[in-house]
Amino acid sequence: MALNVWKYASPQTFYPLAGRLVPWFFTLAAVLAVVGLYIGFFVAPTDFQQGESYRIIFIHVPAAWMSMFLYIVMAFWCAVGMVFNTRLSFMMALAIAPTGAMFTFVALWTGSLWGKPTWGTWWVWDARLTSELILLFLYIGFMSLHAAIDDVRRADRAAGLLALVGAINVPIIYFSVKWWNTLHQGASVSLSRSPSMASTMLTAMLLMSLAAWMYAIAVSFVRVRAIILERESESDWVHELRSAAA
Amino acid sequence: MNWGSAQAFFAMGGYALYVWGAYGVAAACILLELWVLHRRHRTLKRDLSRRDADGSSGQT
């Protein structure tokens, strides 16, 4: 079985595989999002404290989870690339970064719009919000550093190192609500106890999170295909692929 | 069902600006990302075809 894993680690075999999987992941994302939004807006009850403003949760929490999760995946691929020197690993990391940055921005934006009616302020410099903002800067820094270095292999390694060092920020974001006094509420969902919210709310939030996850996979596969073509455009297999398609 | 009317739905109990502001911008971000990606693939294809054409004319 190990053989199969390494087989798909080559850009040449991964390119068509990703192409076949993309429509499935987009479809899954769309279906999950429609069901999640339906439950979130039409089935889940009004919150007795926050009224309807709490419905921002169905986009805010999935975006925030994905912002952290995608960073971990990106740093993981950077580590794999640095240890095994596999071409595809850094391409995956590069393909994930813009989507991770997008989700981080959405988490910050929706959080701000949720903070105003519930806390009375758009923004505070507390631990959770500040560390999430730093996450956005880490994504942007990763992409800028990579773009600033002409030699692709050196760019991969330099940006990869930045991604790995920055990974320390992710547990800081996650535990910030426990470690420091903060306006941000604690985790509503954790592995150690039952969630502190109505089950329909939780269902909608989990469906939206799955939708965000499937979307992230689909989009990064599309992007990694572009990166593969850009980087390997001189290789024989890209020429063969293109002449076969023409 | 939570809402008596479409109007009540869009009013979001007085939080329309916040709720729709959040979902609207999130949707815009996703659409922007898809559009940028679509353009990237299109330009890439064009560049590669041009390079193919240049390459074959150079060889002959």
Image (cartoon, coloured by chain):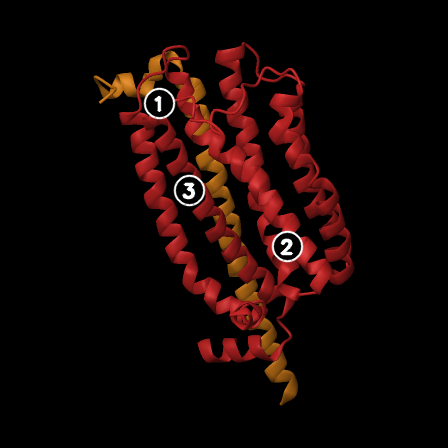
Q: Residue furthest front?
A: A192
Q: Nearer the viewer, residue A164 or A93?
A: A164
Q: Assess whether mark 3 and mark 2 are in contact (beta carbons under 8 angstroms).
A: no
Marking on residue A210: 3
- In this view, A229 is above or below B2: below
Q: Report in which chain the residue with disc 2 lies.
A: A
What's the distance in space between the residues labelled 1 and 3, CA to CA? 19 Å
Question: Residue sitting at 49 percent across and 12 percent down?
Answer: A118
SS assignment at label 2: helix
Quadrant housing the N terminus of chain B = top left
Q: Report in which chain the residue with disc 1 lies.
A: A
Q: Are marks 2 and 3 on the same chain?
A: yes
- In this view, B8 is above or below A226: above
Q: Report in which chain the residue with disc 3 lies.
A: A
**How packed is label 1: few (under 14 Cα within 10 Å), some, or many (20 or more)?**
few
Marking on residue A198: 1
Please, what is the three-letter code of the amino acid marked with disc 2?
Answer: Trp
